Image (cartoon, helix red, strand yellow):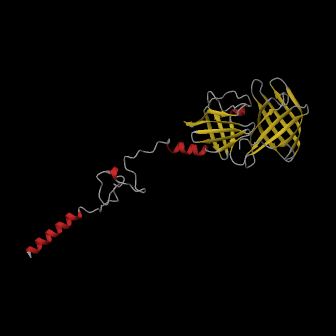
Amino acid sequence: MARFGSMLGTWLLVITMTGCKSGSTAVDKDVDDGPYPNWDSGHRGDSQADTEVPEDTEAPEDTEAPKDTGGPDKTEEWLELDEEWRDCRGTLHITTDAFTWADADPACTVSGSASLEDGLLTLQISSSESCDGEIPWWLHAVDPTPFGYEVTGERLTLIPEELGESGSAKSMLVKQFAKGDVDRQRWEMLSSEGDTSNLDICFLPEGPFYTGRYYATDDSCSFLSCGGDATGALKTKESFTIYTACAGSCPCVGMLYAEDFSEKALAGSWSGVNCSRKMSGEFTATRVDFPDADL
């Protein structure tokens, strides 16, 4: 019996020593010491570099950490801005760290960098193509203006941190865009004195007016002014009224009032006042296709 007990002890010792070389690994699931180690045929490899790591295996601990993207707040801001935004002149496409502006008429494309810092958006021009006309006032080629911004529903509003002179209506210092199926209308206007202007007005997908502009298409600035903003549009069953304004050295306000109107034509009276005189007259307007060089 003593001999049997001695043999049994020896046998248990052999089993215990053999079990220590097994590839089985005991893991305490309640303790998190980081990624599990890589194993080669059940044993820790002497050289990790020579061991092929399966694709679904976690990367080694010394793998380079992902670059800091600015945190979740910046990501949310860029996602909010990453859209194609339209006004009555063209389309602004903002992506993370970049932007592109395209005029609807005449064709013109401006691109550059976009940056966000302390809640301010700055657009810096790096190149332009086919831009014979004036680049929009809110795109400053030399000293870009930081904008505060608000995204409300389908609308983007840019608010300059520092107010400046826009050369148009003061409301133009606050720039508005909209996304989605924007209704952009162009009206070719003719005054009773023979002066011509274009009126571009824009409506949100759900219907309300949100921005617009007008500009003379001849050498005369006698019809309202040389150019400015359409600041409002009100349509009822009886009339269609458009409000205008301009800034610069001689600010002005004006109104187009049409009792005779349809989807394709307007006819009525206009009036305005600037720094030196009052103006009034009759006008007609015909709706034409809105240019689409920016689409």
Q: Position of residue 243 (x, y in %)?
A: 80, 36
Left or right: where 162 falls relative to 117: right
Q: Looking at the picture, tell me which residue is in the foreground, 88 or 133.
A: 133
Name of the residue lying farthest toward the left: 2
> In this picture, is 53 found above or below 152?
below
Q: Position of residue 35 (x, y in %)?
A: 36, 53
Q: Looking at the picture, tell me which residue is in the foreground, 62 or 200.
A: 62
Q: How many marks overall?
A: 0
> In this picture, is 23 found above or below 84?
below
Residue appearing at x 17%, y 69% in the figure: 12
Residue appearing at x 10%, y 71% in the figure: 6
Q: Splitting the image into 4 quarters, where does residue 196 fall?
A: top right
Residue appearing at x 84%, y 43% in the figure: 287
> In this picture, is 10 found above or below 152?
below
Q: Position of residue 4 (x, y in %)?
A: 11, 74
Left or right: where 200 falls relative to 69: right
Q: Splitting the image into 4 quarters, where does residue 90 fall?
A: top right
Quadrant assignment for the C terminus = top right
Q: Looking at the picture, tell me which residue is in the foreground, 185 or 46.
A: 46
Q: Position of residue 267 (x, y in %)?
A: 89, 40
